[in-house]
Amino acid sequence: MNFTRWSARLPGTQRRAAARTDDSPTALPSEGSVPAARAERLSDAALLPVVDELPVREVLDRIPALVALVQGPDHRLAYVNDAYVAAFGVRPAGEPARVALPELAEIGLLPLLDQVLRSSKPRTVKSRKAPGGRSYTFTCTPVEVSATPEGSGVLIFAADVTDHAEAAERLRASERRQRETAVTLQRSLLPQELEEPDDLRVAATYHPGGTEAAVGGDWYDVITLGGGRTALVIGDVMGRGVRAAAVMGQLRTAVRAYARLDLPPHEVLQLLDGLAMEIDANQIATCAYAVHDPNEGRLVYASAGHLPILVRDESGTVLRADEPTGPPLGTGGWMHASGSIPLGPGSTAVLYTDGLVERRDADLDEGIASLERALAGATGTPQVVCDRLVRSAGVTADHDDDVAVLVLQHPARTGPDSELFRNAALELLGGVEAAPRARAFASGVLTSWRFPTDLHDLGVLAASELVANSLQHGTPPMRLRLRRTDRRLIVEVTDGDDHLPRRRRAEPADESGRGIAIVATIASNWGSRRTPGGGKAVWCEFALPRTT
């Protein structure tokens, strides 16, 4: 545009000027002329100033926006309007912009002037904070100043958007506070310290999504069930923010309560499914629940729509626990089932949420396959493996989804360490000789394990009472198992009857009913559960004295 003849280039100006030349006060209306009513309106409008007659400088001086004109390759200042002077003070004409307009240099606008001059295309920079604290949106438009030797120039137009910028900043601050609240709630609901099973080494990590992503409902947990068994849980509540974190907290609390019942994994998920529907019928969640029994060397699990557990064996081969998998929690109407996967000494298992493997530009199976390859080469402690898997997945601070990873290892113990983990079992055939045989077996095993006399005697008494209880109330087959770890002695009796014993107060005249009460009194912990093949297991634990 030509700054000195700005009005002459406005659209429609030439047409209006030609129309005024043709009109005259004495002209007679011709056929097809404007009706009288419209002619009156045009006559009234003719009394108002038209754009052609407005002095450009006067217009620019009076508008509230900031206007400046620079010319030539050095962007020498040619003009600033009154609003610009009011905002930044008087500016010396003829000086380069870096000297005359230091506020533009401070906000980095000078390179944009070069781009506009070279490309002859307008450019806009939104909401830049200038010296003094006000925010402006700058539009730089190329102009042709033919009346000056400099020729080309750039017209700078700055609109004050401080109110909009402050409102946007308040909104961002509110979103940040809400996200921080959700992150704090999420972290507070996750276990602050993982329980440490005797036979497993575990580590976990949680990475919230980046600042632009709302926090989700990922969670994990490790629950020692007693008798040497351990429950491992990982889940993901669909949705974002405080609501998802709150639902996650309720589900995690419920999982811990249901786990204490020592139910099979699929029954735990069945209970969780009903609870999820009660919490919020529109809120669904995925969950994988697994139980490790060191005596079996397997991981028994059930999955409600969650990603498959991965297990790396001692040779480095990675297995994927694909089936069975049911729908997510909260859908209802589905009977979950349990499966199993080997987890012997030297094995490592990984439970994770979809944020670790799901990407918008790749198939989910590709992400899981990539995680399998990373796990195959991952060695070291569970925490080292956990960190390596997160790094290999490319999880960074600005990741667009939450990530939770739980890693467990069943160490292969050798040398002196293996002496601290021992097993011994006796098949009980029934009859009057079963109880004496069980006492003799327990005494011999505990003596060979070099337990102190008091712990030896308590272990023999517990074995005798549990066997007697099984002989009286259970059915064959029966087995006595003694197991020691570096922390405790475990005594367990299994039989073919699935009726679980309970502790009750025996009356003085009762001839039975004191066995479980005796065991509960002398042991550190006791419990019972139904076994997968039918029947039950009753166990008790004794804490070993700490060695100095």
Image (tube, helix red, strand yellow):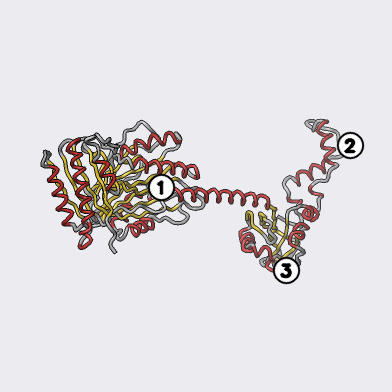
Residue receiving disc 2: 26
Q: Amino acid at mark 1?
A: Trp
Residue receiving disc 3: 95
Q: Quadrant of the C terminus?
A: bottom left
Residue receiving disc 1: 219
Where residue 185 sits: x, y (%)? 48, 48
Sequence-first disc among 2 and 3 = 2
Seen at 68% across and 62% down, the residue is: 131
Q: Amino acid at mark 3?
A: Glu
Left or right, 41 with respect to 191, comes to right
Residue 545 in the image: above or below residue 466: below
Left or right, 548 with respect to 218, comes to left
Quarter of the view holding residue 271:
top left
Seen at 37% across and 58% down, the residue is: 387
Where residue 206 sits: x, y (%)? 42, 52
Instruction: Depth check: give the residue in front, 259 or 353.
Output: 259
Contact? badges 3 and 1 (CB < 8 Å): no
- Where disc 1 sits, the SS reads strand
Instruction: Depth check: give the residue in front, 160 or 298.
Output: 298
Quarter of the view holding residue 331:
top left
